[in-house]
Image: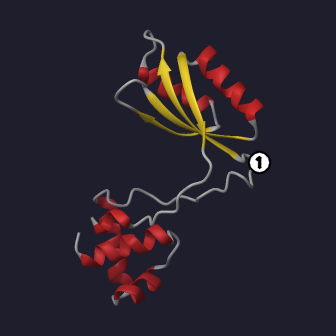
Amino acid sequence: MDRIDRQLVAALTHDGRATYQELGRLVRLSSNTVADRIRRLRKDGVIRGYRAELDYGVLGRDMQIISEIRLQDTVDTAEFERGLDDVPQVISASRLTGEYNYQLRIVCANALELEGIIDRLKKHHGVRQAHSRLVLHEVPLARDRILRA
């Protein structure tokens, strides 16, 4: 990746819907050249896709929870991961080293819904223990920071 590729990726992290013309003006290249570069960045796996950023509060899910999960010893991790599709309030999951097996990010409307989610994970998904904390707010960090490393 050269300097121009980094500028294009940085611009797309701020606005994934930017047009080739807009990006071209930013980096002083033609829209066709920008399109070729973006296609190459996608082919090389630098850009994996484009997504909408949701406001969970507007969707009625004002609470965000970080929950560390310890599985029962007999639970297959691949099966657990597949089973998370059945729990739509889990918006991200990471497998961990150390004391806990996973860290889940959960969005819900209230404590009662959270209790139901944790109970469901324990009853149907092999969770032995859940250590959960309420997220007070997200710290806004520039999405393109890694490009400066």
Q: Position of residue 139 (x, y in %)?
A: 53, 58
Q: Position of residue 121 (x, y in %)?
A: 60, 22
- Which percent across, then down, holds residue 82? 50, 27
> Mark 1 = which residue?
60
Left or right? Give the position of 44 relative to 114: left
- Residue extending farthest to the left is 2
Q: Residue furthest top?
A: 74
Check disc 1 and report its element: helix, strand or loop: loop
Which quadrant holds the N terminus?
A: bottom left
Q: Which quadrant is home to the C terminus?
A: bottom left
Residue drawn at (64%, 36%), measured in percent from left and top? Answer: 88
Q: Amino acid at mark 1?
A: Gly
- Which image quadrant for residue 90? top right
In the displayed structure, does residue 116 sit left or right of residue 16? right
Few, some or many residues within 10 Å of mark 1 (<14, 14–19, 20+): few
Look at the picture and state if 127 lies above or below 18.
Answer: above
Q: Nearer the viewer, residue 103 or 47?
A: 103
User: Relative to residue 8, is residue 52 drawn left or right?
Assistant: right
119 and 135: which is toward the camera: 135
Q: Quadrant of residue 101?
A: top left
Q: Nearer the viewer, residue 102 or 30?
A: 102
In the rendered picture of this protein, how many numbered marks are placed on residues? 1
116 with respect to 26 (left or right) = right
Residue 43 or residue 96, whichever sits in front: 96
